Amino acid sequence: MKVMVLLITSVFLSANVWAKGSSGSSGRYSVDIVGEFNQTSTKTTATGTNAVTYESNTGSGSGAGVLANVRLVEHFSISLGVLYTSRKMSYKAANTTTVTYNLTSYEVPVYFLGHFGQYFAAGLVGTYYSAIGDLTYDTVNPTSNGQSVTYANANIPKSDTAFGAVVQATIPVGIWHVTLIGNYLLGITNMDTTATGALSTTRKINSTNGYVGFGRTF
């Protein structure tokens, strides 16, 4: 909780510093409280004997946090955020057992946005995440729920980065606004990389994310 408060405070202070360092129309900045919905997919690539490559959709997750945006010039802005998120990452083991990991983390996204008119923007996003605590996981065939495992034993890094594309729409509501954001992140984490004899398996996690924010431009 202390980390979350510190990160949120950093976002507000960064927005204020950026805005004060700008002038005219480029000095505007906004702060939004956002809610997140995410859907992950796990791509497994194997090389060697009996190699199989497949991608399977997994369960959805959610999150919440704060996002600050600074308009640096007329058609370009940068957003910095901090989110507390939960994700479900799933894969099918060689013996047909389906394993679903439940991951909670702090995520720090940075958006580089080009603006098209007053209401629409698109650009690139980079995200850093740092996991919280240990993992819990569920299995199907056989069924077992709520088991605990460390990230090291699950071959999942506790922190990682991801990159992707983002689109954004801003809807004015008086002095406030509603912000709608969608992004797709490639390789949010290397879920597992193992080598057994002639068979090498790598699992990558990609994520589709949607955000609804409510905030104000200053």
Image: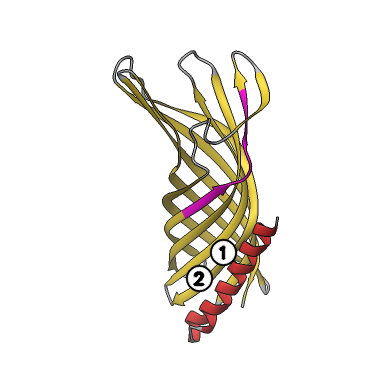
Q: CA distance from mark 1 to mark 2?
A: 8 Å
Q: Nearer the viewer, residue 181 or 174?
A: 181
Name the residue nearer the viewer: 95 or 30: 95
Taking depth in this image into account, of 33 and 94 the one nearest to the observer is: 94
User: Residue shown at 48%/53% (left/top)?
Assistant: 127
Q: Quadrant of residue 46?
A: top left
Residue 129 is covered by the magenta coloring: yes
On-image quarter of the C terminus: bottom right
Q: Which residue is mark 2?
A: 118
Disc 1 crowd, CA 10 A, few/some/many (<14, 14-19, 20+)? some
Left or right: residue 33 compared with residue 91: right
Asked whether the viewer can see residue 178, the reply is: no
Outermost residue, bottom direction? 24
Report if the CB atoms under discs 1 and 2 are less than 8 Å apart: yes
Dominant secondary-structure state across the stretch colored magenta: strand
Where 165 falls versus 117 (above or below)?
A: above
Magenta residues, start to end: 127-138
Q: Nearer the viewer, residue 135 or 64?
A: 135
SS label for mark 2:
loop
In the rendered view, tell whether residue 9 sits above or below residue 97: below
First reached walking from the N terminus: tag 1 or tag 2 = 2
Q: Mark 2: which amino acid?
A: Gln
Question: On the picture, is 203 further left or further right than 47?
Answer: right
Dot 1 corresponds to which residue? 170
Name the amino acid type tagged 1. Answer: Thr
Q: Quadrant of residue 38?
A: top right
Name above or below for residue 122 compared with residue 182: below
- Identified at 49% across, 36% down, the residue is 156
Task: Please give the name of the residue rendered at 66% of the width and 19% of the height, measured from the top-left corner.
Answer: 144
